[in-house]
Image (cartoon, rainbow, N blue to C red):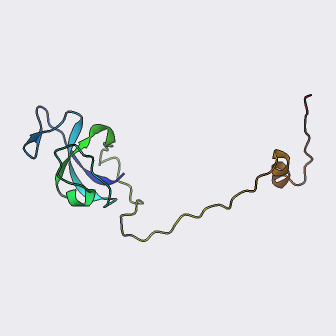
Amino acid sequence: MIAIGKVNITYGKQMLHHKPLPKTCYKVSIQDALLDAACIPNIGNNGFKIVKDAVGCFAAWPKDQVILIDQEKVTPPSTIPKDGEKTTAPKVPPKRKFGSSASVLKQAMPNKKIQKNLQL
C-alpha cells in the first residue's frame, strides 16, 4: 500500500480534470501518502508524478491496484511507517553453513542416532 484515499464511484460517464476517465480506472481522492516518493500510475490524465503531490486531489487509479475496504469494518493499517519516520531494520538471522543432511540432523538432534538407508 502506498496511499489511503476515497474512491468516487458514480454511474455513467466520469470526468477527471475535464477529460474522460478510462473505464479501467477509479477516480480516487488521495487523503494520506504512506510512501511519499511512490510514483502515481501514468494514466495520461493525472498530471502528478508522486503520491505526495496528489494528497488532497483527485487522480485516476487502475482498478486492479485499488483495495476497497469498508471503513466501518476495517481500519487502515497503522503499523506502516510513513516516509521520514525512523524505523529500525529487521534482524537478519545468521547464515547457515552448508553441509550434508546428516550433519544438519546431528545439529538439530545431537542425542539421537541417525540411520541412513542406501539403495544400490
- Give how far across and how far down residue 102 sits, in percent: 85, 46
**Can the viewer see residue 110 in this picture?**
yes
Q: Can you say which quadrant of the picture contains the C terminus?
A: top right
- Give how far across and how far down residue 31 sits, in percent: 23, 56
Depth check: give the residue in front, 99 or 9.
99
In this image, 31 relative to 35: left or right? left
Q: Is residue 56 above or below residue 114?
A: below
Point 13% across, 33% down: residue: 11
In this image, 4 relative to 14: left or right? right
The furthest residue to the top? 120
Q: Is residue 9 above or below residue 84?
A: above
The furthest residue to the left? 18
Point 10% across, 47% down: residue: 17
- Give how far across and how far down residue 39 sits, in percent: 30, 53
In this image, 107 relative to 10: left or right? right
- Hey, which quadrant is residue 115 in on the image? top right
Depth check: give the residue in front, 97 or 86.
97
Give the number of marks: 0
Point 27% across, 40% down: residue: 62
Point 72% across, 56% down: residue: 96
- Hey, which quadrant is residue 116 in on the image? top right
Q: Is residue 120 above or below residue 105?
A: above
**Can the viewer see residue 55 in this picture?**
no
